[in-house]
Amino acid sequence: MSQVQFLLVAFCALGFFGSLSILTPSVPWRDFTILFRKEKKEEYLKFSNSFLGKTWLAVGCCSSILLLVTFVIRINIRPQLIIICFAVFLLVMRILLEISWQKNKNSF
């Protein structure tokens, strides 16, 4: 197993474990920003768990698809590129979470 495949297996495990927040929307899994919110904490927690659960599910699915592709086709990808793409994706999704919360917080 190459380094890339090992990394993709780790991202699959992280992604599918992280998507458990879809099933338990009222449990504070990993969102520590709820400690600094002054209003609508419960609503934000449900909203963020749903959003981040879908994000982690997407990470798990994409990583598993890439892992299967690396078993079939020999792809020469540097592990650093995968880590950078993973970090940028999570950062963009966190920003999109805050933007969509600001748009939708009045409807709760």
Image: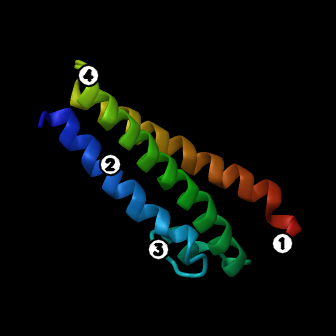
Q: Quadrant of the N terminus?
A: top left
- Helix, strand or loop at disc 3? loop
Q: Position of residue 68 (x, y in %)?
A: 32, 35
Numbered disc in front, either 2 or 3 = 2
Q: Earlier in the sequence, mark 1 or mark 4?
A: 4
- Residue holding disc 3: 29
Distance (Cα) linking label 1 and label 3: 21 Å
Helix, strand or loop for disc 4: loop
Q: CA distance from mark 4 to mark 3?
A: 32 Å
The circle drawn on residue 108 is 1
Q: Residue at x 48, y 71 (%)?
A: 32
Q: Quadrant of the C terminus?
A: bottom right
Query: Counting other residues with Cα less than 10 Å from the Cα at mark 4, is it few (<14), some (14-19), or many (20 or more)?
Result: few
| Type of the residue with mark 1 | Phe
Q: State the CA–CA distance, disc 4 to disc 2.
A: 15 Å
Q: Residues within 10 Å of mark 3 (few under 14, many from 20)?
A: some
The mark nearer the N terminus, 4 or 2, is: 2
**Residue at (37, 43) in percent of width and height:** 64
Q: Amino acid at mark 2?
A: Phe
Whether the residues at callouts 4 and 3 have beta carbons within 8 Å, the answer is no
For badge 3, the amino acid type reads Trp
Earlier along the polypeptide chain: callout 4 or callout 3?
A: 3
Mark 1 vs mark 4: in front? 4
Q: Earlier in the sequence, mark 1 or mark 2?
A: 2
Task: Indicate the position of residue 90 as horizontal and vertical percent values.
Answer: 47, 46
Q: Which residue is disc 2 drawn over?
A: 11
**Kind of residue indicated by mark 4:** Ile
Eyeballing the image, is 23 above or below 9? below
Q: Which residue is mark 4?
A: 77
